[in-house]
Amino acid sequence: MLADRARAAIQAHALACYPNESCGLIVRGDYVPCANVAHHPSEHFAISAAEYAHIEDLGSVQAIVHSHPDASALPSLDDLRACGASGVPLWFIQSVQRDQHGAVHAGRLHHITAQAIAQATATAPLIGASFMHGVDDCYGIVRRYYRAALGLDLPDFERSGKWWTDAACSLYLDNYEAVGFFSLGFDARLQTGDVLLMAIASRYGVPNHAAVYLGHDEILHHLWGQLSRREPLPRYQRHVTHVLRHRETLNWKM
């Protein structure tokens, strides 16, 4: 998908720009570095229209690339939205981190596709979707996020309304391993993409809600009868019973 020379150029540019985000374009298989003209380049990236147009003269843009300093290579919600709206089919995200000795290293290079994002959000957006139990609910948004961010199709499960009122039923605990998740307890150090199980007004203390951790103490979730949204995690921290990490990201560092 990406030639070694382009991968090496992406990493070198990301390291040179740290602690700011690097950005660039893939044209004819090669990485073309760009200037980050965002107002807060340590948090966001922007490529000027003039530079973008100049690079397009070299050939069609095959991919947009940027780095995540001291953060996971998994896409933010803003990344997913921008990729889906950009008209460019492929985005690469390079993580860069400083170790305990002060040395800066290039981490994982992850890609997202506009096609996966479009498929994930074809029936409902990640933000602002209406609630429909069994389809657009808390597990539904976990499935859509993982389809968009990792290209993974998590299996679905039939679930009756308010299944957690049955003491013998535990939808999440019975199935998370089969879906590819591992439990890290409830006090693990969180990574972007972790799924947080919660017990909210659950008669038997059964985890009856799930949220995706977005980083920066924010979650993406879909509460019963409400619109899907992002919210601060501290508001829900006391409800967390399990932290789940998918095997695809289990060994990811930053």
Image (cartoon, rainbow, N blue to C red):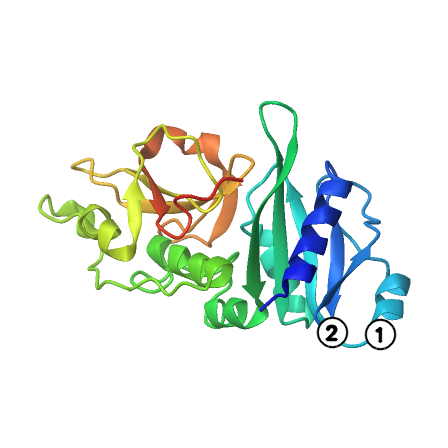
Residue 199's x, y, as percent?
A: 28, 38
Of residues 7 and 168, the one drawn nearer to the viewer in this rendering = 7
Q: Residue furthest top?
A: 101
* Residue underneath mark 1: 58
SS for dot 2: loop
Of residues 92 and 210, the one drawn nearer to the viewer in this rendering = 92
Residue 134's x, y, as percent?
A: 29, 62
Instruction: Name above or below for residue 237 compared with residue 42.
Output: above
Instruction: Name above or below for residue 155 compared with residue 214.
Output: below
* Residue underneath mark 2: 28
On screen, residue 148 versus residue 46, left or right, reads left
Quadrant of the drawing holding the C terminus: top right
Q: For the residue marked with disc 1, what is the amino acid?
A: Leu
How packed is label 1: few (under 14 Cα within 10 Å), some, or many (20 or more)? few
Residue 224's x, y, as percent?
A: 35, 51
Q: Are circles 2 and 1 on residues that touch, CB within 8 Å? A: yes
Of residues 228 and 106, the one drawn nearer to the viewer in this rendering = 106
Q: Give the mark nearer the N terminus: 2 vs 1.
A: 2
Please report the residue visible at 61 percent of the width from the left and 66 percent of the height from the top. 2
On screen, residue 180 versus residue 114, left or right, reads left
SS for dot 1: loop
Residue 103's x, y, as percent?
A: 65, 29
Please report the residue visible at 72 percent of the width from the left and 55 percent of the height from the top. 9
Instruction: Name above or below for residue 216 compared with residue 44.
Output: above
Q: For the residue marked with disc 2, what is the amino acid?
A: Arg
Please report the residue visible at 36 percent of the width from the left and 28 percent of the height from the top. 187
Residue 108 got which mark? none
Please report the residue visible at 49 percent of the width from the left and 62 percent of the height from the top. 148
